[in-house]
Image: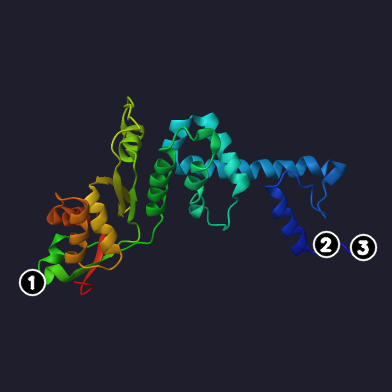
Amino acid sequence: MTSPSLNETQRDFANCLLDHQQPVPPGIGAPNGSSAEKRFSIYRNNVVMSLTDVLTAYFPVVVRLLGEEYFYALAREFVLAHPPATPVLTQYGARFAGFISSFPPITDLPYLADVTRLEWLRQRAYHAADGDALGAADFKNVAPSNVPRLCFRFHPSVGLLRSKFPVFDIWRTNTFDKHIRTIPATAPGQAVLISRVGMSVRTLSIEPGTHAFIIALEKGENLASAAQRAFTVADEFNLQIATAVLINMGAITAITEGGPR
């Protein structure tokens, strides 16, 4: 019987790291006659602990809501079920919210998945590509008659979330308040806009109309068309305020004329 190649040994080693049911892969030995099983288990534990530490850093509010002990146990289950698909760990955790939403022991915390999504959008924004945001001065040369036809290109860091739960208030009090406020899960839902200005990730609660407005703009619709969609969601939608929000959040990187009227 031929010995496994180096590539085969490395592949089997990686496949077995997160599967505690598998034996030590063939070709793995230990010096001085010590147990290969025990030494391999050290690698397994270190991998799980390292990935758990990554999730702990990315989702501090979820850690606070669940408590460290429970979060570590939850994160371990996630790591074992969803190991990284890429060595770029800044991309690890995108599936965590979905995992939480379907994890039976915490179905009594229905808002938790959306809080997780909010924190992931912040993580994603921090590591997004750079882009030069436009300021109010960049709009001064636009002729008033052309304003309705403007289309926006958004900064790579921009993220949107709309939840039926008060996710922004839950996130904010657990992030900034010395004495955490009790936010009833039955309070009105909230929409959130996230972007990065320089190295600072900004998080803002926005009105439903503004959320619908930005969604339409992201799809390539012009200001007039996007505003019409916003008014169908909220009669009180204010186009000037919504546009100012995008500018102040550094969310716009380019403007063009065109799109559906």
Identify the mark at residue 145; answer none if there is no mark: 1
Q: Which residue is most to the left?
A: 144
33, 142: nearer the viewer = 142
Q: Which residue is most to the top?
A: 179
Above/below status of 59 relative to 213: above
Identify the mark at residue 4; answer none if there is no mark: 2
Residue 129 position, x and y percent, is 38, 61
* Mark 2 or mark 1: whose residue is earlier in sequence: 2
**SS under mark 2:** loop
Three-letter residue code for mark 1: Ser
Query: Which residue is painted at 47% across and 31% down in the image?
Result: 66
Please report contact status of discs 3 and 1: CB closer than 8 Å, yes or no. Answer: no
Please report contact status of discs 2 and 3: CB closer than 8 Å, yes or no. Answer: no
Question: On the picture, is 32 further left or further right than 202?
Answer: right
Identify the mark at residue 1; answer none if there is no mark: 3
Q: CA distance from mark 2 to mark 1?
A: 72 Å
111, 124: nearer the viewer = 111
